[in-house]
Image (cartoon, rainbow, N blue to C red):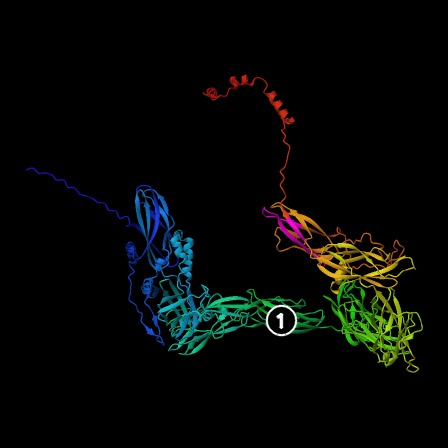
Amino acid sequence: SGSSARTIVFQLEAFVDADAPVAVETFGCKTYEISKTKITVKNPFPRDCEFVVTCQNLRLDDPKARDGLDLLEQGNAKENTSSRRKVSRKDGSIGVTRGADIADITRRADGSVVKSLSCDKVLSQLPRVMRSKYPGAFGAERIAAKVRGNETMQIDVAFLPFAPGAHVARLTFEDPDHGRFVVELCGYADLPDPVASIKSDLEVRPQTFDVVVDHANPGFERARKTFLEQHPGRTDRAEAMKARAASDAWPNSISYKALSHSSYVDTEETVVVSRNPEWQPGQEFDPISMKTFANKIKPMRLGLNVRDAGLYKGVVVLGSEHDVRVLHLEFTAGVKRERACLEFTCSARQVVTQDIPVVNGGAVPMSVKGTITGPDAHCFAGAGRDVLVAKGRRDVFPLSFHPPKQGTFHATLTLRTGNDIIRTGNRFGADNTTADTTGDAQNEQTSYKLTGHASPPEAEAAITIHAVARGACVETLRVPNVFQTQNKTAQYEVECDLDFVGGEASLLVERGGYGEYVLNLAPVRSGTFHGSVHFTTKCGAAVWYAVTVLVDRPAASAVVEDFDSHTPDTSPLVLRAVTHTAVRRVITLKNPVSTKSVVFRVRHSGHGLLGAPTLTLAPGKSGEYEVVYSPLLPGAECGSVSFTHPTLGEFWYPIELVSTEAPHVEVPRVSSSLGSQNCETKLRFQNPTDQVIEVELGSSNELNFSIVSPASKTLTIKPFEKGKIVVRFLPSKLNTVQNAVITAVSATGGAWRWKMTGTADPPSSNGPPTKLFVTLGQSGSHAVTFHNPFEFALSIRSWLESAGSGAGVDGVDGDESSGNGHFELLQSARFAKGVVVGANTAVSIPFAFKPTSMLRTETVLVVRSASRGADVPPLTWRFPITGEPECPPSGHQHSLIGKARRRFEMGVAVSLKHLPDQGGGGGVGEPGVPFTFEISAPQSEREHLQKALVVTPLCAVVKNGEVKFHVSLRPVRELHCVVDLLVSVKTGGRWRFPVQIAADAPEVDGFIEVKAHVGHPQVSLFHLPNPDVVAANFTAFFTPDSPGAFSVTPGTGVMEAGTPISVPGAHGVTTGNGVTTGDGVNTATARKRFDVASEAAENGPGVTLRIGYAPVEYGTSLVGRLRIVTKENTWTFEVIGTTPTYVKPTAPARVDTHISKETDAKMKEARARNAGNVVARNTKQAHYTSRKMFSAKHTP
């Protein structure tokens, strides 16, 4: 039977899981650190693709992240069991964690155990960090990639975790035409680096320790900055915003859970950290900082279970939902943390010892053995035996340093024990004594690094040797062997720095012994000499002795008066002189060397003994040396003159010096009238020394001979200059010679004495008159002082009389026979009858003056004394008085206004009102009245105006009651004041004319333009004339606000003196004793110039400055301020730096059609060479050069 076939149809449905990763890449780093890796990705499609690359960070609860988390957790089984146990503090208020199980324990092959902090165990006990607040950990640099089919490409991936633990992300590659695929990124973040390492030294006892925890996390802040600068996710605005606001959104107070894995460190379960704006991130935790912030933030308190000396290390982990931080702890109890180091410092060949304390804290005795190793171990020495320390006792291990020579030496000391731990401490202040302890408890060792610094050796001994010049002596030194500790001989090389000391060049000292070295001394001159003798080995070890040689003088030499005539005189020289005079004596010496000249160095001993410093003698000849004795102080002493030669030695001669006080200098007799104070005498003397001397002055009779200059009675005189004393003679007796002794005494220059005598003459009236100025029509008063010259009281009367008359009118009667009523005595009736003046005292006699015309008035005040017997008859004193009227002010004021450092001038015409007729009716001021003038200035501005103001008269006499002046002012600074121009005429009278001076602040003195191209500095010359006629030092500089492109040279120097000028049109300028003017009137006394330093020409000498300009860029013009300063003046100039205007060069257009002769000759030569039909000639076979013909011709 037949069978029928059936068709089976299957419906196939394809399912492609595009989200399943085609590859997995793993990463790892610490929290808050970035890791960048290049991964290789293969294009699974056979065609070329252009992928869009996106990176997506997954949440831990996302199902897509499950596979990645499982991969990371393989082999890392979590241990959720905990060894935490709660205990109570003494107050029972908070819980404490101790020894939390957060470490992995690994046993090495050698049996040692290593404990490491386990991140998984730590995270299982800490709150989970809220990752959604922070940027994702993964990011890819590329956002697009073009790759061929089945080819690979490189992608840069960055991993920066903000939370510890596992992180998963997906890197998606999508092409719109072919599809997409996924690469899974799995990363694991370990615990972050410690935010602080806390180290401290503790006592061996249980205690607490406070640690201040900063609110800010430095590692977290660095991670934020790194993300915004390097992470690819910074281009995502949302991720970047999370990074910027990450820690700013933290609350002001954060609660952390604390974990400690050390059984010696207890922590609180919860630590609260508060924000403190005064705390600086990264500040170290030290006791001072802890005390500073103790009252502001609550520190984390640690409980330390310290039972024995040693090093205690621990780790505390703080975790919250915001961040995780790690703190490293290291506490040292009883020993230092650093590596042990002992330093020694001493001189070479000296010994210094350091005791190292050793403590046995065990229950059995401890034996300590020291071993010294290293390149310089022979320089150090230990105890030489084992040190046995009883249980619970302390002992020391002595260590000494004995360097054989100068230098630095290194070695290592190792202390070993087999019974108990070595615990060391430095009881003697060596801060670097620390130990490195290795091994177990039954075999401990501590190593010390030894460093010894040896300075140059000290002198073995200080030897003092006595010798005599031009003699010989011997001294023996006992020299030790420097290699005594090494038991070998010492071969020394000997050196001495004294030229008169000799001996053997070397010395051999046997091992462990001493050697004797003989010094031979032969000094040629006396004195004290200091030196040293060095014994040095080839390896540098040395011994030296400090040597002091006291050399006495040889026997005194005989004095030869006449070398060839008689036997030398063996007695000492005797020189006698009075102070401030000189005596001379000659000493004769002979040169014993007949082959060459010799030069002796001469030294003098004794006050006032002088002479040449050297004496030269010809070969075999004699010479004379002159010694001068010029004493300044009296007395007697023994001196000497020494002649020293390097080879001939020293010769000396004793001298007896005797000086006596100089007699008084007789001053010619002086005379003075009784009551006069005008008799003065000047005394001069010279400083005879080369030093400044202070001289005290005195007088034996201050009543009659008083020192008026210097008023302080003390005089300072420079070397070899003269001093001056002014003595005033005031007689007090008639017909008697009065005397005094004037003394000038100096401690170093000696004393000077002058004997002065004087006699008294009868009173005279030749003294200067008393002058009084009073405004016309007003009354003024003054007084004449009468001094009683006698040593007893004197009764006097006074009255006025006319000048030139011998008869006077008694003031009591009031009869004024003087012929004018201008003067009047102002005295009471009792005073007019007479007054008694005490001995050597003074009395004032007042008078009044009232002028009625502009004419000078003179009178005489007569004072008469009563008789005092035959010795003192009645005496009369006459005191001339001159009354000068002054014209009332007119109310007009002249003004002189300008700027400082600018000369401004003007003409001033003044009218002399009330000037009386001269010459009887010839008109006012006819034929002319000579006049004088002066300037009265304020005291504060007088010195300035003396240098700045010049007033010159333009006429010699007063004409028509008017006088004209030329006034010039050049102030160097701002000035505001009023000066008075005072004009006086010959017949009497004075006129006052005020002049107001106003000089405002100076402006810029000028502008200087300099030009230069960029890169091409230029220098311009600027000449500044000196306005003064004297040279002056100057300083030139640009102000600090000026651009650096400007410079000026020279910066300092001397400005040459200016050329003096005279005022044009000045009439009758006088020089010397006077010059007659055009009017025939001598004006030597009629004019004055009110100036000290005259003005100079504006274009005269001065200083030339070089102004440099070096621009560095194009642009606007630069402006600087140049300032030139002298003692009297200051100038300011604005310097403008510009760039020269570029001028395009112009040249005429020219086409040269002329053929040069050389070219024309060559052309003619070519034409002659190629004459004929060149084309026809080239068609010939001989000249045909085609390839075909050439080939045919040469083919065989």
The reply to whether residue 582 is in sight is no
Q: Position of residue 490 (x, y in %)?
A: 55, 68
**Mark 1 residue type:** Ala
Quadrant of the drawing holding the N terminus: top left
Q: Nearer the viewer, residue 311 or 341?
A: 311
* Above or below: residue 543 compared with residue 1092: below
Residue carrying label 1: 546
Bounds of the magenta segment: 1107-1136
Q: With 851 as the anchor, is 134 left or right in this view?
A: left
Specify the quadrant of the image occupied by residue 683.
Answer: bottom right
Taking the magenta stretch, the answer to whether it contains residue 1109 is yes
Q: Position of residue 945 (x, y in %)?
A: 76, 60
Specify the quadrant of the image occupied by residue 982.
Answer: bottom right
**Residue at disc 1, secondary structure:** strand
Q: With 899 as the anchor, is 575 left or right in this view?
A: right
Q: Position of residue 1105 (x, y in %)?
A: 69, 51
Taking the magenta stretch, the answer to whether it contains residue 1182 is no
> Which residue occupies 14% across, 40% down?
7
Residue farthest to the bottom? 869
